[in-house]
Image: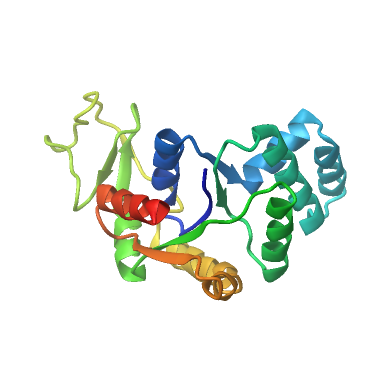
């Protein structure tokens, strides 16, 4: 069982790698946003606290987020490794996570960062589009349908692009990511927990690199 933090900006392939880790290592991806919504919907003690804050238009505190993470870890039990996604983002949250894990006999094993080249990432994201019928993914330069204008998967002829897949949005996301990860990386680097993986490499090569880190 391993508990890890997986870092990477939107478009780095973090979701794909987290999905593979869940399938191959029986791990669970813990996204604070998803957990918050689930806790509110389930009406857990911390979820009710969060709902009251959100209904009043406030921001959910670190204490509440920590409580939700604790509830989820208790629900999962000790046998499941977890992938933390979007948390921690500050030094205070990193220290809080230490306490959450320690009190449950767990520890953070690795902090894996998918490192990307910003210009290449802009090119990767702004060129992608999908079939409007089956959601098969394509790219203007790297993965076009075998027959122009016809989906390989279902034969559909309508395609769509996400409205936020544009250069300005991607560069804003990159800046936000750097701002959010900058405070926590030194903490984990000082503990020797950070491993960097080339997020621009082929998906399978990225998976292989992560596997090597987990086995190390």
Q: Residue at x 24, y 23 (%)?
A: 154
Colouring style: rainbow
- Image point (83%, 54%), residue name: 58
Q: Quadrant of residue 180?
A: bottom right
Q: Residue at x 70, y 62 (%)?
A: 93
Residue 117 is situated, as x and y percent measured from the top left of the image, at 33, 69
In this rendering, position of residue 44 left or right of residue 201: right
Query: From the image, which quarter does the C terminus lie in?
Result: bottom left
Residue 13 in sight in this render: no
Q: Note whether 2 is above or below 76 in the view shown.
A: below
Judge by depth and name the residue closer to the eye, 153 or 106: 106
Q: Residue at x 46, y 53 (%)?
A: 164
Q: Is residue 215 left or right of residue 95?
A: left
Q: Left or right: 212 with respect to 96?
A: left
- Image coordinates for residue 122, horizontal then vertical, percent: 35, 63
Between 108 and 65, which is closer to the camera in this rendering? Answer: 108
Pick the front one: 5 or 37: 5
All told, the count of numbered labels is 0
**In the depicted view, which residue is nearer to us: 155 or 6?**
6
Q: Quadrant of residue 73?
A: top right
Residue furthest toward the top? 154
Q: Is residue 148 visible?
A: yes
Q: Position of residue 185 (x, y in %)?
A: 54, 71
In the image, is 3 to the left or to the right of 13?
right
Report x, y in % for residue 158: 29, 32
């Amino acid at each position: 069982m391993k508990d890890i933090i997986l870092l990477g900006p939107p478009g780095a392939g973090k979701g794909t790698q987290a999905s593979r880790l869940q399938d191959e290592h029986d791990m669970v991806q813990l996204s604070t946003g998803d957990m918050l919504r689930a806790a509110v919907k389930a009406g857990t003690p911390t979820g009710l606290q969060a709902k009251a804050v959100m209904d009043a238009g406030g921001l959910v505190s670190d204490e509440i987020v920590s409580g939700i993470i604790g509830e989820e870890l208790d629900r999962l039990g000790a046998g499941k490794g977890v992938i933390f996604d979007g948390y921690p983002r500050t030094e205070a949250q990193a220290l809080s996570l230490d306490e959450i894990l320690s009190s449950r006999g767990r520890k953070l094993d690795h902090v894996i960062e998918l490192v990307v080249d910003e210009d290449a990432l802009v090119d990767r994201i702004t060129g992608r589009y999908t079939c409007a019928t089956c959601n098969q993914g394509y790219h203007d330069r790297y993965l076009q349908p075998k027959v122009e204008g016809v989906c390989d998967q279902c034969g559909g002829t309508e395609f769509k692009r996400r409205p936020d897949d544009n250069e300005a949005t991607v560069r804003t996301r990159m800046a936000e990511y750097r701002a959010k990860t900058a405070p926590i990386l030194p903490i984990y680097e000082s503990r020797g927990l950070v491993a960097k993986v080339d997020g621009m490499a082929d998906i399978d090569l990225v998976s292989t690199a992560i596997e090597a880190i987990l086995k190390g």
